[in-house]
Image (cartoon, rainbow, N blue to C red):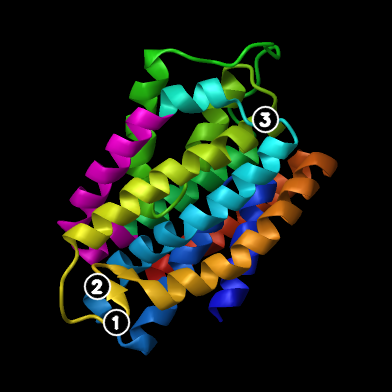
Amino acid sequence: MFLGLGAFTGLSAGLLGIGGGLVLVAALVWLLPGLGVPADQAVHVALATALASIVFTGLSSARSHHLRGSVLWPTVAWLVPGLLLGGWLGSLLATRLQGEALRWFIAAYCYLAALQMALDWPKSRAERGDAPRGPGYSLAGAGIGAVSALVGIGGGSMTVPLLVWRGVRPVRAVGTSSACGVAIALASAAGYASHGPTEGLPPGSWGYVYLPAALGIALASVLTAPLGTRLAHWLSGPALRRVFAAFLVLVGSSVLLG
């Protein structure tokens, strides 16, 4: 079960740079209560577990994109300080919110991400030859990291549009976003682990991170992320984005129903 989730997550992370974490959270919200996770903590555990697995997915995807020269490392360096801070603070806030509030927040984010993908917004500026950089990206990174921690994603649905809007070619925006997702996932998962409960969750839990699920998902996702990366360099985006937008609407609805 977790291997199947991981395979889909890795593919979508490499292909689109977004969406894998949202699918994981939605699936885990449904599955975890059947594995002994209390229903009132299922959303927190789903978020933490998804983010822990994204560390490995992001590393695999970022490596594949790096080998193809599509990671803008100077931009990553400016974004990372904010991403780390935002991811940690976002996870701290999430542990203090009720699961029902997080459920509505995640669903709303799915709908907004779907709308953004369907409209293909923002439009790219004229392609630039240099890597975007500056303190403004660190500030933006803090917001991206905080929201990502609250919805259990690697931040691609915010990082990619930001970079595309700044004139970065889409495939390089996806590659750069995959590297940024590692920083978000590390900080967020560490926050959920350290601020989570010490008892009341199934064996194998580290705070809110359910390690058996995180490792099973990661094992498959690191194998399929390079395939998604290759597809990202081959496929035309608009039709694929519209299909995935519709899928995100279903994901958001399933989180509410879960």
Instruction: Tell me the crowding category of disc 3: few under 14, some 14 to 19, or many 20 or more residues within 10 angstroms, Cα based.
Output: many
For residue 145, above or below residue 193: above
Which three-letter amino acid code belongs to the residue tagged 3? Arg
For marks 3 and 1 on the same chain, the one whose residue lies earlier in the sequence: 1
Q: Which residue is mark 3?
A: 172
Q: Which residue is mark 1?
A: 37
Residue displayed at 27% across by 67% down: 208
- Predominant secondary structure, magenta span: helix
From the image, state whether disc 2 or disc 3 is nearer to you: 3
> 200 left or right of 70?
left
Asked whether 65 falls inside the magenta stretch, the response is: no
Residue displayed at 16% across by 70% down: 197
Which three-letter amino acid code belongs to the residue tagged 1? Val
> In the drawing, what numbered circle is on residue 41?
2
> 55 left or right of 13?
left
Secondary structure found at label 1: loop
* Residue 183 visible to the viewer: yes
Q: Foreground: 65 or 8?
A: 65
Q: Position of residue 132 (x, y in %)?
A: 54, 15
> 5 left or right of 158?
right
The magenta stretch is: 80-103
Q: Position of residue 52 (x, y in %)?
A: 41, 60
